Amino acid sequence: MMQDCKNQESGRYAGWDKKTLKKKNTSRPQRPVKLTVHEMNLVSPDRNAKDIGKLKAAIVRAESVTMPNRTQLYDLYHDITTLDGHLGGLIEKRINAAKNKLPGLRYINAKMQKVDAFDALITSDKFSKLIELIIESRLWGISGVEFIVGREFDFEQIPRKHIRPEQGVITLSQYDSRGTPVADLPFVWLIGEPNNLGKLLQCAMYALYKRSGFGDFAQFVEIFGQPVRIVYYDAYDTQTKDQLRRLLNESGSSLTMMIPKQAQFQMLDGKTSNSNGELQMSLIRACREEMSVAILGNTETTTSSSSSGYAQAKEQAQQQLEITRDDIIFVQNTLNSEKFIRILRSCGYPVVEGGKFEFELELDVDMLTKRLAIDREVSAHVPYDDDYWYFTYGVPKPENYDRLKAEQKEQRPAATKPPAVDNDHNKPDANDVKISKKGKNLLARMKDFFLEQLN
């Protein structure tokens, strides 16, 4: 199997240099590159019933040291993310929070100047899908794409069940343990850490418990949502028993009980401590809160509790903003990876030495107002570098910065030069003393008052 994969690989990229991702000089006509994704034997997701036992078995299989396989775990991930509306909403909210920052993404050269040739790429749907896969790598643990060789930026997503990140190979079947090394696939890009199973691992247990909680709640409503009809009859009166049975069958489908008068019957329905199903709902809410904390870092930005207030919601929104900023930094570092830069260069984009993708600084006016007051006070005692002010407050640095800085230094001595002092009239008269006292602040005037009293 391994030898067959290598033979296929040698034919797939025979006309390409794997290091520079450029076509080799050859006189033979080049065949279209056949994608690895198109050769895979895909299998439908497993939709059988899932429980905690299957989750534990899937984790053990995925964490195996000798032969790890994430197929069962990713089938379970797919099941809970597509059927659980709350979890799906949390994932979509986190991904959209990062994708909405794309208008502030730009490619700059070594001189910090924007390269306009990348604007069409950044605003394309394919690039937006790539950003989504980058964020999903933190949730699923891994994401993989195979770029299509050509003039346009295009790619196919590699099914996660065919990726063996621990071994660094791509398999043709989700059940295989051996496959083609990613190092031999120059246009295949894997995103994520090899041993990371993703944030969904923390949510899987709560999603399964929540599903069971809804099942218990549905059963509670089915049993106690309709009135229970209890009929007592004489055990020896069979004719009355038959008439009652026929009457109950024809009068509806509610729960019915026929009990002989001679028998003792007691119905313990649990309504004393759970009269309205609050017990089941409390379990469901607890599972939702745990998943919200795992994905967004808070609970109040998605659902509202009875004890929440404006201050609490504002604080938790700030916590979610910190996670979004961390996602943006992760996306920026991933886009600036050496592998992706080589792929962009092979697609004909003007990638330059020292260039990089960078998100524009998003300014928080309230935070900057407080920070400006602190910076003014500190800068009076400690010198600040000019680049600090440009970066912190998002002010664009002019291209003729050096010339403007020199002119500013020339104008500063003239503006700050102290006025000439007449040594023959050093002693101020009485009127000047009165005027100077009025110009002082309250603290200085109080100090002068007590000094005069002491003298």
Image (spheres, rainbow, N blue to C red):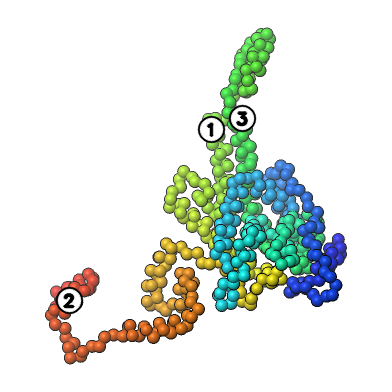
Name the foreground residue: 131 vs 268.
Answer: 131
Residue drawn at the location 53% of the way across and 32% of the way down: 276
Q: Quadrant of the N terminus?
A: bottom right
Q: Is residue 403 above or below residue 85?
A: below
Q: Is residue 353 above or below residue 36?
A: below
> What residue is disc 3 on?
222
Quick one: label 3, few (<14), some, or many (20+) residues within 10 Å? Answer: few
Mark 3 vs 1: CB contact within 8 A: no
Tell me the amino acid under the disc marked 1: Asn
Q: Is residue 263 visible?
A: no
Residue drawn at the location 48% of the way across and 75% of the way down: 397
Q: Is residue 390 above or below residue 145?
A: below
Horizontally, residue 178 falls left or right of residue 199, namely: right
Tell me the amino acid under the disc marked 3: Glu
Mark 3 vs 2: CB contact within 8 A: no
Quick one: label 1, few (<14), some, or many (20+) residues within 10 Å? Answer: some
Q: Is residue 228 above or below residue 128?
A: above
> What residue is disc 2 on?
435
Residue 295: quadrant of the picture:
bottom right
Toward the left, the furthest residue is 430
> What residue is disc 1 on?
276
* Residue 151, image x, y percentages: 71, 67
Name the foreground residue: 452 vs 3.
Answer: 3
